[in-house]
Image (cartoon, rainbow, N blue to C red):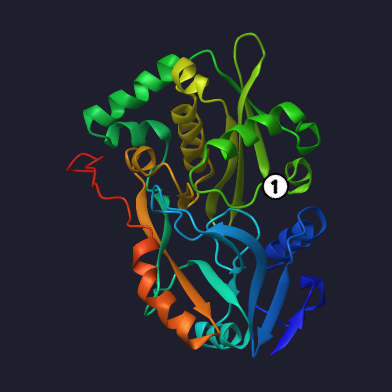
Amino acid sequence: MKEYSSIADIENCQIQDDIKKLLLLLERINPCGQMYYKLEDTVIVTYIHRLNLFNFKKGLKFSLPLRIVGLPVSIAMPGIFGDMSPALKILKSLSGLSLILNSDKKFINGGKTLSSFVFKNQFSDYDTYLNSLRSSYRRRIKIAQEKGKNLNIKRLENKDFSSNHYNLYKDVFDRSENKLEILPLEFFKEFSADLYEFKDHKDEVLAFVQILERKNELLFLFCGFKEEDVKNHDIYYNMLQFILKEGIRRGTDTINFGQTSEETKSKIGCIEEPKYLYLHHNNPLLGWALKKLTPYFSYKGYPNKHRVYKVNS
């Protein structure tokens, strides 16, 4: 096994170029003890973060610093590039407590973390999508569109991302029940993703969304808005509808709306895709205890199923 402090030093690995660029950017603007480990052709990405292990249990809190195997940015992508068997060998060789997050593969004695909610695009245009919905779900969208009819949405150049936009992002972060990393303003200025801002009729910035198209998938990365504008403009629903329209317009196969807001995303037609976690400690006794406790602090998944589409859709 080899270890590295920069992704730039690793040759002949399975990490795509765009992910390497993201990791290099995060090393520079969001240093958090990033380390990379390689065994055979497999690389794992790790960073240090203080995390509440009982994040999914309301009323319980037990925070401690640990090594997270994942990307040091709050998006639902795994930090393992290659096969799982070498990755677990790497993990077992590392001292202390480690946590694999956002794995697509289930673990024996593992648990679940927040699911992703993915829209499978089968529509030629947005109107076809609307017409495929059952009346109650279509009506909910129409209500949002009416409340947001005065919203002006336009493309925002990365260099023009301002402290006003950033404060909206921090508002969302502060309200989040599942906090991980808070990114600096420079991330939005420098990361090559698409930004769109939402303004009202007074030309005041109310919200923004950041999206990224890769591998025929549109990814909803980050956003910002004030809670009061959910009531005033149904802002979050309109933001999701904009992303959905954009994905359909671009013709991507899927639109990954990310984690959280399970009910809202399910009701616009998203499918829940589970993500898995695994805790490991190199102390055998602690490792055994963690495996027994993992089901108690795992995410339970969204419990409801919604029949969004008409039977013949």
Q: Position of residue 93 (x, y in %)?
A: 61, 88
Q: Residue at x 64, y 36 (%)?
A: 170
Above or below: residue 195 compared with residue 192: above
Is 18 on the left-hand or right-hand side of 146?
right
Q: Residue at x 30, y 28 (%)?
A: 138
Q: Which residue is mark 1?
A: 183
Above or below: residue 151 compared with residue 248: above
Q: Residue at x 47, y 35 (%)?
A: 240
- What is the residue that sits farthest to the top in this orientation? 202
Residue 312 vs residue 232, the one in the foreground: 232
Above or below: residue 79 compared with residue 168: below
Q: Regarding mark 1 in the picture, which secondary structure is present there?
A: loop
Q: Position of residue 305 (x, y in %)?
A: 23, 47
Is 223 on the left-hand or right-hand side of 28?
left
Q: Amino acid at mark 1?
A: Leu
Q: In the rendered image, which quarter contains the C terminus?
A: top left
Q: Position of residue 206 (x, y in %)?
A: 61, 22
